[in-house]
Every structure is written in C-alpha cells, then in structure tokens.
Image: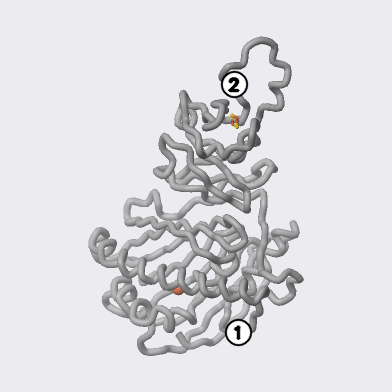
Amino acid sequence: MSESKRAFAVVRLADQWYVACRSTDLRRRPLARTILDEPLVLFRDGEGRPTALLDRCAHRNLPLSQGRVVDGLLECAYHGWRYGRDGACRLVPGLVGPDEDGKGRVVPSRAVCEQQGVIWVFAGTGTPRSEPFRFPHLEDARYTTVTADMRVEATLLSTLENQLDVPHTAFLHRGLFRGGARHEVTAVVRRFADRVEAEYVGEPRPSGLAGRLLAPEGGTVAHVDRFVLPSISQVEYRLGERSHLAITNALTPETEFSTRIHSVISFRLPLPGLLVRALVSPVARRIMAQDARILRLQTETVRRFGEERYVSTPIDLLGPHVWRLLKEAEAGHRETVSGEPAVEKRVQLII
Ligand code: FES
Ligand SMILES: [Fe+2]
C-alpha cells in the first residue's frame, strides 16, 4: 500500500458490476444511489425491469430521483419530462408544434442486471463483457440464508481488509468471536490472477457464541478468507460434511470514503436454521457495528492527518495482496491467468 503516490489508498475500478440495491428496495418509487461518485437513479419500467440512469434531468439538472414513475416512465419533478429505460425523453408536457432538438433530450443509462434478488449496475460507460458475480449456496435448499446491508465510512480497501483480517477479531470482537484460548496455526496465502485467499490449517473451532453455533462439538475447522476482484470478500468455515458457513460480501464503492456492504450469509449446520438465525443475527449485528465504528475512526484519522500511513507485519495477510490486485486491475493489467497461484506462502500466527 505504501507505493501509492496518492495520499489515500483509493482505487477506481470502473467498468465493473456493483450491487446497487436489493430487488425489494426498488418498488414504485425511484431510488437514488451513488456508485464510483456517479449519482444514479434506479426505477422499474412498465414491465418491472430495473433501469439505471444518471440522476440528472437533461432539461435543467434536477435530480430525477426526486420525481416519480408514471406508466413505466420516469417523470421529472420540475417540468414533468418523462424518460424511458434507455434514457430518451418520451414526453415534454406542453410542447406542441415543430420539435427539432429531440435528440439532445436524453439521459445516459447504465447496464443493469437483476439476479438472485439483487440489482447490479455496470458502473462505467463500457459494455459489460461478463455477468455479475453469483452468490454461492443461494439456490441450495440445504442452506439457510440471511442477508444484511450496511454502509460504512471507509475506502473499499479498508473495508475489504477489515472483513478478511483475522488478528483483530480476538481483540475487537473479544467474547463474540474468538478472544478465548489462543492457538498457533498455519495460514497458506495463495494469490491468483483475480483473487487472493488465506487458508488456515489446524484452526480449532473459534471461541465465542458464533464459534459454538458453528461447531457445537468442537474440533478443527477448515477456514478460508478470500478476496475476488473487483469487490467481493468471502469468509468460509467448514467442519466435516455437516457444517458449513459462508459469508459473502459484495462491496459497492459509493465515494472515496463511503462503501456499501451487501452481505449474504449462508449456512448448513447441525442445528435448525431458524434457531441459528435467531441466535446469530444479534451477535452478527454487534460484530458489524464494532467494525463499522472502527472503520469510521480509521477514516476520520486519515482525513484529519490528510494522509494515511501503513506499517504491516507478516500476519497482515491479505490487505497488501488485495491492494495489489486492485491497483493492477485499475491499471488494466493482471497476472497471467492460470490454475496455479502466482504467489503461495505459509505464515505462522497465533489466533
Ligand atoms: S428540469 Fe426536469 S423537466 Fe425541467
Ligand atoms: Fe471484524
């Protein structure tokens, strides 16, 4: 992270799919969202298809998100111009007679994809060459899934690092997740062309309520933390065939210091799914609130100092790799795509 010439470790990965909202967030009213500093308005057309336009009326710069949807068209709140899903103006109230300048009455649109209950927007003017990320386990009936959304005051990088960082858990989340007896384990870090992961070998079941629910009988868990370009983090725990917990976060960079988190928590445990959900939800909310507070404090500090500084040790396993992958993707080059990791190293740590 230190090689950046910028004061802050901020990346702008345009021409990527980012989550705009859940399907259920977008009903009859237009919805304002910001992705990569770009104000957008989302609405559903006459057939219920989600649409994203720049949030600025072509006429006099009103935010279109202040308008309403009429007959599947987005109507501006000022003079009532109406726009279709392609951003073209279809109606100018009061306009009669010759109309020669209709071509300029258009608002730029962005590609949208609705799948798995999530609305993705392709942030950028390019054409999507791939589909958005698919959340695993959602269609698997053996899994129970909980979703959660939140916004944090932090860069994309700090948010990703926080989600994939193990050493802070025993300290910041003591008693909720880890913080009991410490154990030395081996982490194997593997970086591929589009991802980096840390696999923990020989990790005992984490202490704290969340760990007890995951593995009531104790034992050793298989634990992997993973970052996937452009903005996905995953934390997975497995205990034999019966227990599997997978937390997948799709992050959306709104602005430099504002990141939205869309979490999908899927689990298959020896206990009834509804019971686990009822027990885990309050604990997960407290853990997320602790992380959000820390990220806000971190952001306030780097802003106050006007720059950020990092000193890392070998147990800051994934942050530097995430930074490198993001910067390389931003610059348009990637490591060679192959099945073999470009980097593989083992690190001993106590967790
Ligand atoms: S500003 Fe939107 S219709 Fe005039
Ligand atoms: Fe945390």
As rendered, which of 47 and 43 lies closer to the eye?
Answer: 43
Q: Which residue lies under the disc numbered 2? A: 92
Local packing at callout 1 (Cα closer than 10 Å; few below 14, some 14-19, many 20+) is few
Q: Secondary structure at mark 1?
A: loop
Q: Earlier in the sequence, mark 1 or mark 2?
A: 2
Residue 312 x/y as whole percent: 62, 83
- Relative placement, left or right, of 244 versus 153 is left
- Tell me the amino acid under the disc marked 1: Pro
Q: Residue at x 33, y 62 (%)?
A: 268
Q: Residue at x 38, y 82 (%)?
A: 174
For the residue with label 1, is its CB less than 8 Å from the closest atom of ligand 2? no
Q: Quadrant of ligand 2?
A: bottom left
- Tell me the amino acid under the disc marked 2: Val
- The quadrant the C terminus occupies is bottom left
| CA separation in Å, label 1 and label 2 | 62 Å
- Relative placement, left or right, of 15 versus 197 is right
Q: Which residue lies under the disc numbered 1? A: 314
- Relative placement, left or right, of 316 versus 138 is right
For the residue with label 2, is its CB less than 8 Å from the closest atom of ligand 1? yes
- Relative placement, left or right, of 124 versus 318 is right
Q: Residue at x 46, y 89 (%)?
A: 184
Q: Secondary structure at mark 2?
A: loop
Residue 273 x/y as whole percent: 27, 60
As rendered, which of 134 and 303 lies closer to the eye?
Answer: 303
Above-or-below relation of 240 to 266: below
Residue 11 x/y as whole percent: 67, 62
